[in-house]
Amino acid sequence: MRRYSLLVTSLAFLLTLLVAGWDQRLRPKPIPLTPTLTGQVEYCLTCHSDLAQISNSHPVQTFGCVLCHGGEALALDANLAHSTMRGGSNPSDFSVVQASCGGANCHSGTPESYNNHIQRATTSIQATYAGAIAIIRYTFGVQPDLTASLGIFSVRAPGSTSGITSLSAFDPFQETNPFVKAFGQNCLTCHLSAQPLPGSVYFRFTGCAACHTPTQSADRSNTQQLQSSQVHKLTTAISYTQCDTCHNRGNYDLRTITFAPRLDLSNDRLHDYYQPIAQFTSCEWMLDCVDCHTRTEAMGDDSLYSSKLDIQYIQCKTCHGTPTELPQPRTLTDPNDLVFRLALLNPVVDLKLGDTILVTQKDEPLWNTRVLPDGTYQLVGKASGQVFPFKPVMGSACTQNGTDQTSAYCHTCHSMTR
Amino acid sequence: MTDVSRRDFLKLASRAVLAAAGLLGLGGLFRFLDIQTDPSPQTDFDLGLPAKYPLGSRTILPDVPALLVHSQSGFSALSLVCTHLGCTVENRADGFACPCHGSRFDLQGNVTRGPAGKPLNLLRTGITSDGNLHLYTN
């Protein structure tokens, strides 16, 4: 019996070594990467070498993977390597964005260096949802006016110029009004920290990636390809279809406090862009949302607001002027002008010193516009790259009074029929 | 042909298996002890004979990355690593441009457009006893 046990033990030992050796042979050869920014080796590319570079501003040789995603840099086992990742596959989720994307040289810098993105985004009305919460609470008599005091999460904005410097977290379970409670349970699906509704047309990530990672194709024809959770891209060329993962997909019904989805969805841009009740003119559906709405309108300006109407200010006259005023031009003379950085991130135009662009009433550059020598203008679509020539109102047959810029007033003459 | 008893066969087989396992184990141990760690980043670059770089030349060294300049005052080198976040800057007729965030530098490496706040780093060069030109990044 002793003789057999020696043989069996030897065989078991040999087998174990063979299995261990075979397992080693099956494992991929580690691919080291030492990013210039960290100087620390990481082995993520061993499995992820086929992943596309996320953007030209974040080359993998400079940033690596771990700086943004976290994770165990030296692990070769997938479970161990991913165990400490920030935000799962999305490091831009607002719960982890400061650790992932922050830093004075990255996205939590100063307004003067134009890189206070995290402070702006997390205080923006799209993140706080403070406007919707305030309206619902006011409508059902829970608060005396429309001034926001609650947001999706508690947040402070010491430099806020709106008069609101902080918001407390909205907790539906603390609300006694059944409608406000139901709103909290059924209607918090379209702020930047909310998981999207089920369904491909709503699919997006959270945090920065909700807008900057394209989960929807620009023309709705290629949705299956892009709606993979593996999409690894950050862009400022944001098509309307990405905005429409939240906007124009339906309505929140105040009687039932539920979301009523649109039933007329179409692959045709004209019918898809806005809901049937909307009134709009041709530029409002031929352009993408980001072609007109500025970075501070979409991402905030470091102040807290009670309504989107407090931050949205782009009007028809911003680009077209009035019968007595031309839109505001700016000739580019400063090489450090923000426009050059914006145009570098999304190179649909080749801006040079000496070029003249349009700016908004708040002096925000519309860097994708150009004033042409003949006094007309052109706009290049940020997502489409399409060139749109346009003219000022001054000198045209337009009979507007020059002061009313409300949607209904301009749409009296300029409205699209579909 | 000699008959081998069952007992002898088992003994022989046990020893053979034990020896094979031992050899395999030793092989694994040697492999473990012989593991090659990743080399430290290179900081000393041997550029060969100085004659390869004639007076007035400006040579891009992509492996460093750096620009080697041979002027009347001798050899000098400029790092092509952007001082903003570490991307490699591109050589242009009027200086250098960072493809990541748009910083620009003039031909001397001074910042002409942010977000970079510091000029490109000057790197040390020297000729060693073998007569070769060396560039040091540390």
Image (spheres, helix red, strand yellow):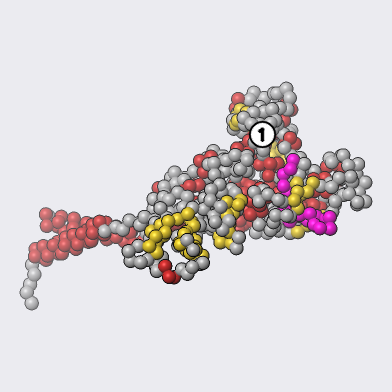
| Residue furthest left in the image | B2
Q: Going by the image, does A323 lie left or right of A187? A: right
Which quarter of the rendered picture does the N terminus of chain A lie within? bottom left
Residue designated by label 1: A303
Residue A303, by quadrant, is top right
The magenta segment is A362-380
| Residue furthest front in the image | B72
Amino acid carrying label 1: it is Ser
Q: Going by the image, does A166 lie left or right of B34? A: right
Q: Is residue A125 above or below residue B20?
A: above
Q: Going by the image, does B106 lie left or right of A243? A: left
User: Circle 1 sits in a helix, a strand or a loop, which is it?
Assistant: loop
Residue B75, by quadrant, is bottom left
Q: Nearer the viewer, residue A311 or A109?
A: A109
Give the percent coordinates (x, y) of residue A118. Answer: 59, 40
Q: Is residue A61 visible?
A: no
